[in-house]
Each structure stands twice: as C-alpha cells, then as structure tokens.
Amino acid sequence: MTQFKTNLPDGVFAASVTPLKKDFSIDHEALFNHCNWLLDNGNNGICFMGTTGEANSFSLEERMKALDFLIEKGMAPHQLLVGTGCCSLLDTIALTKHAMSKKVGGVLMLPPFYYKGITDDGLTDYFKLVIEGVSDPNLKIYLYHFPKMTGVSFSVPFIKHLVSLYPDTVVGMKDSSGDWNNMESVCSEIPGFKLYAGTEKYFLDVIRAKGAGVISATTNLTGLLAAQVYTHRNENKADALQSKLTEARLAFEGPSFISSVKHILAKRQKNDAWLNIRPPNSNLTVQQAKDLESRLAGIDF
C-alpha cells in the first residue's frame, strides 16, 4: 500500500461559490468572509476556483489575484485545494506554479477538456509536461474526474499508471462522475489514494471504502450536517445522519448548483449580491427557485 503524503485534511470540503460584484468582478472581501464562514460551519477545507466557483469564467489574472487576496488576508493555505486545470498546458502550469508559491494544500486538476477522444497515453503525456513544467517537489495533484462536464474520463488504469510514475505528486482525486462503482474501484485498486466523492450522497460510502471524504457544491450549505456524518462515521448513528445528508443533497439536484447555492445564500443572508453570476451562467427562474425552496422546506432543511 502506497503511503500518499498529503497536506490537506480528510473530511468535508466545500466547493466554494465565488461572490461577485454587479459588474461580475470578484468581490475579494466577500470571498474571504465566505471562506471563513465555511470553515466555521462544518468544512475542514475549501476547494477554491472549481466548477461551482465559476473558475472557467475567469481569466488567469483574476484567479491568481483572488488567491493572493485570501492568503494575504490570513487564510490558512494548507486548507485550500485550488483548481488549476485548463485546456492550455501553459495556463495549467502558470496557475499551478502560482498556487504552489502560496503553499496551498494541493491543486485540483481538470483534464484538458476541449478535445475529445483523448487517449490515456495523451493524458499521461499532458500530466507529465505539467509536473515537469511546474517542477516543484511539494506539488500535490488531485485529479478532477467530471466526465459529464469535461467529456474526458480518468480511467482506473490511467490513474494507477500516473500514480506509479508520480506517487509523491499525484495523491488523490475528486470524483464527480456520480458513479459509485468507479469510486469503489479507485479506493480498492489504489489503496491509500485520497479519493473525495463529488457529492454528499456517497460521503459515508467513500469513508468506509477508505477514501478521504467529500468535496461538494452543496456543502456550502450542508457543511454542518456533513460534519456530523464525519464526526460519527464509526458509530451506529452514522447511517441515519447520512440519510439526512443525502436527502438535503437531492433537494438541490436539478438546476445549476451555482445558481441554486447562490439563491439560498442570498435568501438566508438577505443579501442579493449573491445573485450576481457571470454569464453564460444565470440565476434560477422564478419557478425553479420556488421548486427548490419547496423541496428544502419539505425536508425541514
């Protein structure tokens, strides 16, 4: 069994939403406050600039400046998993080098997601070039497996091969495939690999399979409940808590998680600034908002 050396905590991570101003620029102060709020409300760490954070709607400069602000304001870098995967090899290297210069706990890396029909050999070559281009012995890569969005899958043989080449660098993965069989296969075939489920639905299952935890859009709001599951993961009450957590997650499924999470944050905090979403993403329709609120009320969330 490989002993993967990592810096990030196991447990609950929020894939943080990104507060924006009316002109759709990042509200740095609000972002810092939200990240601290997440850590105070059940989350062990923060996935920064992932899908829910609208990362691919921002320029490299915007992403770097936002991270700079968080660190300069005192955010603990070891609790940050920073999204750095881009279509461009050089952009991925630049973002990753920048994140590592801030001593973050790890980077979350999408595959290059525009071209389809990519082979495992092509993916391996890409990650080799990224790792060699960053050239940092402290680099810890968490693969971001999200085939629904990227159209590119990380097969288990590919992951095993990449890990065998870079066991001190490729240390984990966020699996947002929604495919439990895939998550279970990764956990069983790569023991010790830090697998995080991309949905709360499989949180307890992943923990029991010796995975690391969960990284989810909805733990922006379900963090406290997810924390209870993690705290009591080895007790009889864990299954009942997981059922409640799954129920809460399912209530959010349907429309965009970005717009759904921001809608509920705006409503709960009485702050319409949360409704600023950079196009092409947009807010929930009136009917979608009513349906979401009704589902949440129905489970007393």
Image (cartoon, rainbow, N blue to C red):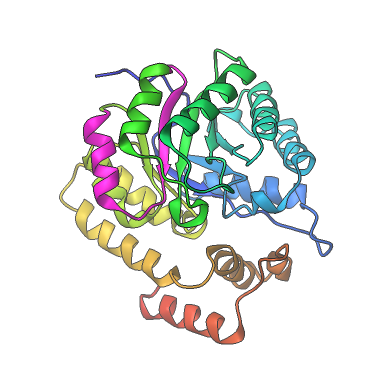
Instruction: Give the total of numbered labels.
Output: 0
Residue 253 vs residue 161, the one in the foreground: 161
Q: Left or right: 155 with respect to 269?
A: left
Hey, which quadrant is residue 281 in on the image? Answer: bottom right
Q: Residue at x 47, y 24 (%)?
A: 7
Q: Left or right: 9 with respect to 209?
A: right
Please state, as top left, top right, bottom left or bottom right, where the N terminus lies in the image: top left
Please state, as top left, top right, bottom left or bottom right, where the C terminus lies in the image: bottom left
Q: Residue at x 31, y 32 (%)?
A: 157
Q: Position of residue 99 (x, y in %)?
A: 65, 29
Residue that sits furthest to the top in the current view = 137
46 in magenta: no
Q: Tell me where the magenta segment starts and ends, as one range.
A: 166-190
Residue 188 visible in the picture: yes
Q: Left or right: 261 with respect to 21?
A: left
Q: Position of residue 150 (x, y in %)?
A: 51, 51
Q: Left or right: 4 with respect to 265?
A: left
Q: Residue at x 27, y 58 (%)?
A: 241
Hey, which quadrant is residue 289 in on the image? Answer: bottom right
Query: As displayed, is residue 180 above or below residue 3?
Result: below
Q: Position of residue 171 (x, y in %)?
A: 41, 26
Residue 30 vs residue 186, the one in the foreground: 186
Hey, which quadrant is residue 239 in on the image? Answer: bottom left
Residue 40 vs residue 294, the one in the foreground: 294
